[in-house]
Image: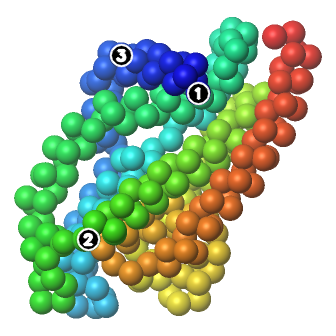
């Protein structure tokens, strides 16, 4: 454990220094991933018309929570891994006594640490622009989630990040056979975009569509952590069981594809 701790700390220090070097680019990434804030304005205005079962304050609160979840669960390993395979830079990493997946995971954590100050500033701006989100209105009270709700939301965010990382890394392994695997993943991202609650809360879905979507892993990546951070009731047991189950299934698939990919990579002369 001590050796692993030293390795992870070394990886984190290296990756964090690298992320700070590209801090301007990280700023652009943070701004580019503010889709929930755009939807915040759209749905808040729509809710003011009175045609929805949720109030403008609830909508603003929901999409601010989605913004937070989105910022701590962003995964980009597929683009990095594809570049390493296509450029031939993966081979030197395979000589190290540590599976490359650990360095990729730590790189994401380092990027999140570098992104944190930007997220805090953007969050403060959102709360100032939409004060009803934390003040509440006639339909919902002030935003004051309890300690248990916040802890549950943080755990759900960690589980959602793990699931998204394993899912995307599994797709990334197809780079051993396909040169532009990121394009394949874009199809899955479309499903995540609409079925996770990122574009619209599941509460505005038709009942049949909502029930069907809840059987997929996508709502538990965004909608579930956001509901917990809001301090609202959510299917906690089902959410964590679903996240944990998909993580285990994809982890097994990932290891099988990884071994097959290494054999193919070696056969190609790497």
Query: Residue placed at 24% from the left, 78% from the top?
Result: 58
Image coordinates of residue 71 in percent, x first then y, are: 36, 47
Query: Residue placed at 84% from the left, 40% from the top?
Result: 256
Dot 2 corresponds to which residue? 146
Dot 3 corresponds to which residue? 17
The one nearer the camera, 170 or 148, is 148
**Vertical relation: 242 (above or below) 209:** above
| Alpha carbon distance from label 3 to label 1 | 24 Å
| Alpha carbon distance from label 2 to label 1 | 34 Å
- First reached walking from the N terminus: tag 3 or tag 1: 1
Image coordinates of residue 22 in percent, x first then y, are: 34, 20
> In the rendered view, does 82 fall on the left or right side of 224?
right
Snapshot quadrant of residue 91: top right
> In the rendered view, does 229 fall on the left or right side of 106?
left
Q: Do the residues labelled 3 and 1 touch (CB within 8 Å)?
A: no
Image coordinates of residue 50 in percent, x first then y, are: 22, 91
- Label 1: which secondary element: loop
Point out the residue furthest to the right here.
267
Query: Residue placed at 13% from the left, 52% from the top?
Result: 124
How many labels were placed on the picture? 3
Q: Do the residues labelled 3 and 2 touch (CB within 8 Å)?
A: no
**Vertical relation: 247 (above or below) 223:** above
Dot 1 corresponds to which residue? 1
Label ID, residue 126 = none
């Amino acid at each position: 454990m001590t050796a692993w701790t030293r390795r992870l700390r070394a990886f984190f220090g290296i990756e964090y220094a690298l992320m700070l070097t590209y801090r301007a680019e990280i700023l652009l990434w943070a701004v580019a991933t503010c889709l929930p804030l755009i939807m915040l304005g759209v749905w808040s205005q729509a809710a003011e018309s009175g045609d929805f079962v949720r109030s403008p304050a609830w909508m603003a609160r929901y999409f601010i929570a989605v913004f937070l979840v989105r910022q701590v669960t962003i995964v980009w390993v597929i683009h990095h891994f594809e570049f390493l395979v296509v450029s031939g830079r993966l081979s030197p990493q395979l000589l190290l006594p540590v599976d490359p997946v650990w360095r990729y995971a730590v790189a994401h954590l380092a990027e999140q640490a570098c992104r944190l100050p930007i997220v805090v500033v953007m969050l403060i701006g959102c709360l100032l622009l939409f004060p009803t989100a934390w003040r509440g209105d006639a339909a919902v009270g002030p935003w004051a989630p309890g300690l248990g709700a916040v802890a549950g939301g943080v755990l759900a965010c960690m589980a959602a990040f793990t699931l998204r990382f394993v899912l995307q890394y599994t797709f990334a392994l197809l780079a051993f056979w396909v040169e532009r695997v990121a394009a394949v993943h874009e199809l899955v991202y479309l499903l995540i975009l609409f079925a996770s609650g990122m574009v619209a809360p599941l509460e505005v879905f038709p009942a049949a569509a909502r029930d069907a979507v809840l059987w997929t892993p996508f709502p538990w990546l965004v909608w579930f952590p956001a509901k917990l951070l809001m301090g609202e009731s959510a299917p906690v047991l089902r959410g964590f069981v679903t996240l944990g189950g998909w993580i285990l299934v994809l982890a097994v698939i990932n290891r099988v594809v990884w071994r097959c990919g290494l054999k193919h990579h070696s056969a190609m002369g790497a």
